[in-house]
Image (cartoon, rainbow, N blue to C red):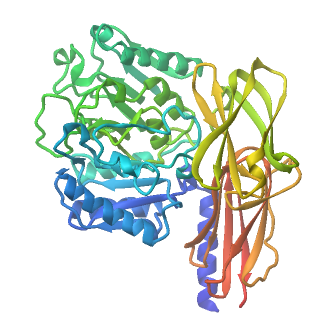
């Protein structure tokens, strides 16, 4: 009993630390898998450091044996892929993971006989174990299903993983990157500045990228961000307080007059992200690099926290759209979400370096920046099928809603209808849509709200009986709450009720007395409502457990007893 009490006290202290500590401790990494190369000491060091600092569950650490060379053959990649897929499948993680993280010391790029089939290892891994897996190794890129999205990412919604890499010239560089990505402030730092450096020479042959920089500047300034948009022939260097950076790098026609190897010599704030329009900026992350084009590794050495790079020639359309990248990041989306939503292609040359769940600010996404304020979204069985209803408080440039469904024989979402929006209005509006197919089986629905400029955002998911495994209960709550499980003590199942006053990202997990996650019951974005989650502990030993919910800023912890 003394040993158990000691463990319990230690675990309660851990939970208190979760609740009152700074923002990084609130980040959950149960949906992140870390991939480590057993043939590389460097990979092991970085993997150990990242796992310890992000509390990666041991079951999510994937150790494989692959070459340590940065460039590998198609056959070597096939072996790498198989090892990763086999471990994910064997551990039942396929649908539980949203993010994959690779490390320095693992292969970086796959060179194939057809140069247009070559790709980064990370971009290929994003497609494994899903509907897009057949495109791996294809003779061209594919369109990313997450491109242009403005919603919290889940693999269930988009059918891919978001994959990033922890890399730099040295292990110390990578440790620094990891440390900087944990410093997530509660509010955007007052000194934060976005530096967007255009080169007017490219206005003739590649105007899109300069236009994207100007668009980003307009959006960020409208949201009271500090922006330096330079559209002159000057190559900017030695900028301070930089939170976001984009330029032409060594493709700027004027860099040689002010610096070497097109390095920026900027002073970056923790959490800063960047992009350069350089076709092979990610060709290598080793010291003694041969130049010709500038390198993303130099930006990491200078103190940036995340950066997008390219292992082979990607073409300008593959570059991150600055008009999407920086506004998303400024609204509190993760590094991976911001880069992948602003990047068109997968199975291609791109690689994102950094902690996938790093953020610029640890707060709810800026609702004033969203075109529609969705206040409810429900589904119920009707005589003619599933009846979907949703309400908006305000709308700004709302083109309309596509209704999407999955279930039955469809493992991915398909469009089943469209309802026109109200444009721009400050008055509440109600909408309804009936799906006649929804009378048989279990179907999950979501709304794709489309703005008049083509940008879109997804709602949370709902079904007739469940929302990602959670029963819905009638009534609209006015506050966040989590009740005591019932029955308690229990054997082997128990019910946990909770209420959401707003649309929130919800994480509900059960822990043992040592603070280890034994099961994640909910890890999804849910609309306002009352919910009931069930835990089946048939395979667990008797004893005390704890369950903890996080929904936005709301956190609650309670104890439950399993008696067999």
Residue 258 falls in which quadrant of the image?
Answer: top left
- Position of residue 428 measured from the top left corner of the image (x, y, whole percent): 84, 27
Q: Residue at x 29, y 67 (%)?
A: 64
Quadrant for the C terminus, please: bottom right
- Position of residue 295 measured from the top left corner of the image (x, y, whole percent): 22, 34
Q: Is residue 124 above or below residue 84?
A: above
Q: Is residue 403 rendered to the left or right of residue 239?
A: right
Closer-to-camera residue (557/312)? 312
Residue 121 visible to the viewer = yes
Q: Residue at x 50, y 58 (%)?
A: 97
- Position of residue 381 measured from the top left corner of the image (x, y, whole percent): 84, 51
Residue 259 falls in which quadrant of the image?
Answer: top left
How many marks the image carries: the answer is: 0
Residue 103 falls in which quadrant of the image?
Answer: bottom left
Quadrant for the N terminus, please: bottom right
Q: Is residue 273 rendered to the left or right of residue 108?
A: right
Closer-to-camera residue (135/245)? 135
Q: Residue at x 58, y 19 (%)?
A: 453
Q: Is residue 559 rendered to the left or right of residue 95?
A: right
């Amino acid at each position: 009993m003394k040993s158990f009490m000691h463990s319990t006290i230690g675990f309660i202290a851990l939970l208190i630390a979760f609740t009152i500590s700074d923002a990084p401790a609130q980040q959950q990494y149960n949906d992140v898998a870390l991939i480590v190369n057993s043939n590389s000491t460097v990979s092991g060091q970085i993997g150990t450091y990242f796992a310890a600092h992000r509390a990666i569950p041991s079951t999510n650490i994937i150790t494989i044996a692959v070459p340590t060379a940065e460039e590998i053959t198609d056959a070597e990649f096939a072996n790498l892929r198989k090892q990763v897929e086999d471990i994910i499948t064997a551990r039942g993680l396929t649908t539980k993971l949203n993010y994959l993280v690779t490390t320095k010391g693992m292969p970086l790029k796959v060179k194939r006989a057809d140069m247009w089939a070559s790709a980064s290892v990370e971009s290929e891994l994003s497609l494994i174990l899903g509907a897009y897996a057949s495109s791996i190794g294809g003779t061209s890129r594919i369109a990313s299903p997450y491109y242009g999205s403005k919603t919290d990412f889940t693999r269930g919604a988009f059918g891919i993983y978001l994959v990033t890499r922890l890399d730099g010239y040295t292990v110390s560089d990578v440790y620094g990157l990891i440390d900087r990505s944990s410093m997530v402030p509660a509010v955007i730092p007052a000194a934060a500045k976005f530096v967007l450096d255009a080169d007017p020479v490219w206005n003739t042959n590649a105007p899109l990228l300069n236009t994207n920089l100007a668009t980003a500047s307009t959006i960020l300034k409208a949201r009271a961000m500090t922006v330096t948009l330079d559209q002159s022939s000057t190559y900017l260097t030695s900028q301070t307080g930089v939170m976001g950076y984009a330029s032409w790098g060594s493709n700027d026609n004027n860099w040689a007059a002010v610096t070497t190897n097109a390095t920026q010599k900027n002073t970056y704030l923790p959490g800063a992200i960047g992009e350069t329009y350089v076709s092979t900026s990610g060709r290598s992350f080793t010291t003694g690099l041969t130049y010709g084009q500038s390198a993303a590794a130099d930006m990491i050495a200078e103190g940036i926290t995340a950066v997008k790079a390219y292992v082979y020639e990607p073409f300008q359309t593959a570059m991150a759209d600055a008009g999407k990248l920086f506004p998303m990041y400024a609204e509190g989306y993760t590094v991976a979400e911001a880069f992948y939503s602003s990047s068109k292609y997968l199975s291609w040359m791109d690689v994102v370096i950094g902690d996938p769940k790093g953020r610029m600010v640890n707060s709810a996404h800026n609702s004033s920046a969203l075109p529609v304020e969705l206040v409810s979204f429900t589904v119920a069985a009707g005589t003619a099928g599933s009846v979907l209803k949703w309400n908006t408080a305000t709308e700004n440039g709302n083109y309309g809603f596509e209704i999407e469904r999955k279930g039955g024989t469809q493992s991915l979402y398909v469009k089943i209808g469209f309802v026109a929006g109200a444009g721009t209005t400050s008055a509440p509006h109600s909408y309804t849509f009936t799906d006649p197919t929804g009378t048989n089986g279990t179907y999950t629905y979501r709304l794709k709200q489309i703005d008049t400029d083509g940008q879109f955002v997804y709602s949370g998911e709902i079904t007739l009986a469940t929302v990602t495994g959670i029963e819905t209960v009638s009534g609209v709550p006015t506050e966040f709450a989590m009740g005591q499980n019932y029955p308690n003590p229990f054997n082997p199942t128990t019910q946990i009720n909770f209420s959401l006053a707003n649309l929130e990202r919800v994480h509900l997990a059960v822990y043992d007395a040592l603070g280890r996650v034994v099961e994640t019951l909910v890890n999804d974005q849910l609309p306002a409502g009352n919910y009931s989650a069930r835990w089946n502990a048939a395979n667990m030993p008797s004893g005390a457990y704890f369950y903890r919910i996080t929904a936005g800023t709301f956190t609650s912890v309670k104890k439950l007893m399993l008696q067999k």
